[in-house]
Image (cartoon, rainbow, N blue to C red):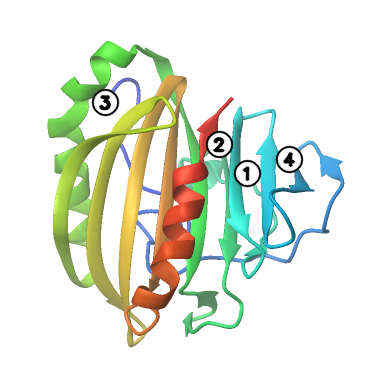
Amino acid sequence: MPGRGRLQLAAAAALAALAALALGGAACAGGSSPEGSRAASGGETTTTYTNTDHRFSITYDTMLTQGQPKDDRATGAAFSVAFVDTAGPKAGAAYANGVQVSVFELARAVKPSEVRGLRAQVEALVDERVAKLTAAEVTEPPSPTTVNGTPGFTVSYTFTRDGVAVSAVSTFLFSGTDEYEVTGQASQADWKTLWPTLEAAMGSFTVL
């Protein structure tokens, strides 16, 4: 992996702590800040979060609540933000249901033509991280994907944390010197109901 020996998601976004999504305080509706901005999109049921500093946007259902954007450099991420189902179950002190975006900075730019060559490294990292989760299993190994023009890999897995069984999908996307990790997860009891909402948000993710 160019310039980085990890593929973990920050605190609640990836295979290192996929078990729960940290809300960290709700953001204000509307307005903008150095961390990003929120704006109504496509009617009354979705909101688009745009972050110009880290060059991405994501549109999510308003049933999800945006958490406080944060610098996660202590865990390896330059930035992360979560959109969580506050009515759903908690795994410990954090929420089990939602979507999180984490941004990692690479030591050098990755060309689109190089991304497929990272597959073995992604697979090794996924195996390493899943081994650290409780009752974890990779249900669909990393496979190539492209999300709105940005290439990467997607992986599906299950695990248990604090008695909550969780299903999750993580997408690892590469653009220049940035790697974006987008995770959608929910308790297995809520998975069938919430997955269309999570999938729509993940599918809307766009590198600007």
Which three-letter amino acid code belongs to the residue tagged 3?
A: Met
Residue 1: x and y in percent read 26, 25
**Which of the marked residues, 4 or 3, is nearer the chain's N terminus?**
3
* Image location (x, y in percent) of residue 151: 33, 27
Disc 3 element:
loop
Determine the secondary structure under disc 1.
Answer: loop
Q: Label 1 near label 2: C-beta < 8 Å?
A: yes
The disc at residue 71 is 1
Q: Element type at marker 4?
A: strand
Q: Nearer the viewer, residue 82 or 125?
A: 82
Q: Label 1 sits on what residue type? A: Asp
> Picture coordinates of residue 56 (x, y %)?
59, 33
Query: How far, Cα to Cα, is label 2 from label 1?
Result: 6 Å
Which sits earlier in the primary sequence, circle 2 or circle 3? 3
What residue is disc 2 on?
A: 78
Which amino acid type is shown beneath numbered disc 4?
Gly
Q: Earlier in the sequence, mark 2 or mark 4?
A: 4
Distance, label 1 to label 3, CA atoms, is 22 Å
Marks 4 and 3: which is nearer the front?
4
How many callouts does the rendering have?
4
Who's the residue at 20% across and 26% down the image?
118
Q: Residues within 10 Å of mark 3 (few under 14, many from 20)?
A: some
Tell me: residue 7, above or below residue 9. above
Q: Are marks 4 and 3 in contact (CB under 8 Å)?
A: no
Residue indicated by mark 3: 1
Looking at the rendered structure, the kind of residue marked 2 is Ala
Residue, disc 4: 36
Image check: 148 left or right of 32?
left
Spatial CA distance of label 2 from label 3 is 17 Å
Residue 10 in view here: no
